[in-house]
């Protein structure tokens, strides 16, 4: 019965699409912070150092492919593709107990929106994703995402991964889009729960030395 409930929850998250169910802002902040202010900082808006090197476009392409492709991307689909339904069910249940069903649903849907919006912003900026490497899928892709989001001090930060996925500037634009459409609390919720979820993934995959971000 428990497994059935978990399966239903994952299915519901997948079907939910991009609909947010009323996120209450966890902190008061402008809907869109000035671009210059955010880019001038060596720290990401929700914590962790920024990354300003070359983007890991092949990793981004692999994640998009795992989630159904650029025209049909779903973050929950990407999770199942990487980790398997049993592991995803267990993690969703754990996160739901920790944060509540509403925030976890908003997190899943928020990640779907963030990736799709990032792809739109990348296209506008003239960034074209390469073909996804054939070998970069499943657990290998999950391990790569853990590595990509781990800062030099060993902490896994959502912002660091997002910077690497396309660029820091595009990450900022996506955050501004999320703030404008759903509110600052929704943006923080995405970063916060992803910090916890990817730390959990690192532990499940026995990746040594990964530390949990202070925002979780």
Image: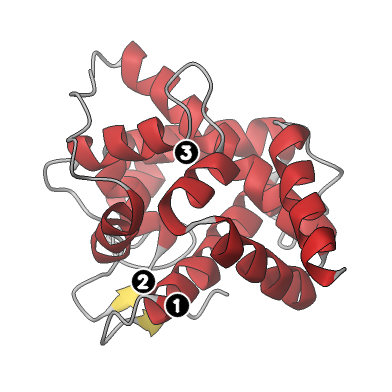
Q: Is residue 90 visible?
A: yes
Name which quarter of the figure residue 211 lies in: bottom left
x, y percentage for residue 102? 83, 56
Q: Position of residue 7 (x, y in %)?
A: 75, 55
Q: Where is residue 92 in the image (x, y as percent from the top left)?
A: 67, 64
Q: Which residue is label 3 attached to?
A: 34
Residue at 36 percent of width and 75 percent of height: 205
Q: How crowded is mark 3: few (under 14 residues within 10 Å), some or many (20 or more)?
A: few
Q: Is residue 20 above or below residue 4?
A: above
Q: According to the image, label 2 marks what residue?
A: 156
Which residue is found at the position 18% from the left and 43% from the top? 135
Q: What element carries label 1?
A: loop
Mark 1 touching mark 2, by CB under 8 A? yes
The spot of residue 190 in percent (x, y) is 59, 54
User: The N terminus is located in which quarter?
Assistant: bottom right
Direction from residue 141 to residue 82 in the image, left or right: right
Q: How far apart are marks 3 and 1 (CA)?
A: 25 Å
Please indicate, yes or no, whether residue 193 appears anywhere in the rendered image. no
Q: Please name the residue that numbered disc 1 is placed on.
A: 213
Quarter of image, res 54: top left
């Amino acid at each position: 019965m428990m497994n059935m409930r978990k399966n239903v929850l994952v299915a519901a998250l997948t079907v939910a699409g991009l609909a947010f169910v009323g996120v209450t802002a966890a902190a008061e902040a402008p809907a869109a912070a000035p671009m210059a202010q955010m880019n001038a900082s060596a720290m990401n808006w929700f914590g962790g150092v920024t990354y300003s090197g070359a983007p890991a476009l092949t990793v981004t392409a692999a994640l998009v492919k795992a989630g159904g492709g650029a025209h049909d991307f779903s973050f929950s689909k990407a999770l199942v593709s990487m980790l398997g339904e049993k592991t995803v069910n267990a993690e969703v249940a754990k996160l739901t107990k920790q944060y509540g069903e509403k925030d976890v649903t908003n997190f899943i849907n928020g990640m779907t929106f963030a990736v799709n919006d990032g792809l739109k912003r990348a296209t506008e900026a003239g960034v074209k994703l390469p073909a996804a490497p054939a070998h970069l899928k499943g657990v290998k892709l999950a391990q790569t995402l853990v590595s990509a989001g781990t800062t030099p001090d060993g902490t896994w930060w959502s912002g660091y991964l997002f910077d690497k996925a396309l660029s820091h500037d595009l990450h900022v634009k996506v955050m501004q889009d999320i703030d404008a459409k759903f509110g600052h609390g929704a943006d923080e919720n995405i970063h916060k729960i992803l910090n916890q979820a990817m730390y959990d993934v690192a532990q499940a995959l026995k990746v040594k030395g990964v530390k949990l971000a202070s925002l979780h």
